[in-house]
Image (spheres, rainbow, N blue to C red):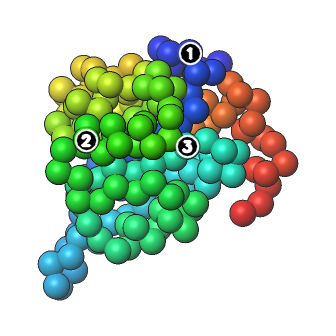
Amino acid sequence: MSTVNYDLSKIKAFIFDVDGVLSPDSIPLSSEGEPMRMVNIKDGYAINLAVKHGYGVAIITGGDTEAVRLRFSRLGIKDIYMKSKIKIHDFNDYIQRTGYKPEEIMYAGDDIPDYHVMQSVGLPVAPADAAHEIRNIARYISHCKGGHGVARDIIEQVMKVHGKWMSEEAFGW
């Protein structure tokens, strides 16, 4: 049984911030000053499975590194918004292009730039270590910290409600 305070059967799309959600909020820098992110393998598995099942999956991030774009495009995500200055603008573009209604969308964010998008979706989700302003507006706060399984946590719960979690597609890449 889910602990999410929302009717998960409504969810058709997942949108994620990267830094602090799909990667930890501490980022090492390369010798050239480029941010180097760590990602969670179980998050990747769940994201790929959601894509295979036809859920909408998108990334909206202020970051702009080719490694991030490659990682998530290889998982099947086509809607990747990089260098997002004002995330609500990219969110509005996404819903206009896809036709999803806000109540059909889960958005996971961890800090102030995510605030307006989180206010606009049906299911705003925060990692356990999100900023307090974000935790205050989240309908679900994951038991996972950013970069440590937040996507897996919420995707698994939604797919279980839809009866898709342990489907035939779950047993392969």
**Residue shown at the point (66%, 44%) measured from the top left:** 54
Residue 2 placement: quadrant: top right
Q: Which of labels 2 and 1 is toward the front?
A: 2
Disc 3 designates what residue? 56
Can I make out residue 118 in this image? Answer: yes
Locate the N terminus and report the quarter of the image it occupies.
Answer: top right
Q: Are marks 2 and 3 in contact (CB under 8 Å)?
A: no
**Disc 3 residue type?**
Gly
Instruction: Report the front residue among 125 and 15.
Output: 15
Separation of residues labelled 3 and 1 (CA atoms): 17 Å
Q: Earlier in the sequence, mark 2 or mark 3?
A: 3
In the image, taking residue 83 as reference, residue 7 lies left or right, namely right
Residue 56 percent across, percent down from the top left: 55, 43
Separation of residues labelled 2 and 1 (CA atoms): 26 Å
Q: Secondary structure at mark 3?
A: strand
Residue 7's label in the rendered image is 1
**Residue shown at the point (58%, 21%) measured from the top left:** 10
In the image, taking residue 168 as reference, residue 108 lies left or right, namely left
Disc 2 designates what residue? 89
Locate the C terminus and report the quarter of the image it occupies.
Answer: bottom right
Q: Secondary structure at mark 2?
A: helix
Residue 20 percent across, percent down from the top left: 29, 48
Instruction: Report the front residue among 11 and 134.
Output: 11
In the image, taking residue 44 as reference, residue 80 lies left or right, namely left
Q: Secondary structure at mark 1?
A: loop
| Vertical arrangement, residue 11 with respect to residue 44, above or below | above
| Vertical arrangement, residue 139 with respect to residue 142, above or below | above
**Residue shown at the point (57%, 50%) measured from the top left:** 47
Callout 3 crowding tier (Cα within 10 Å): few <14, some 14–19, many ≥20: many
**Disc 1 residue type?**
Asp
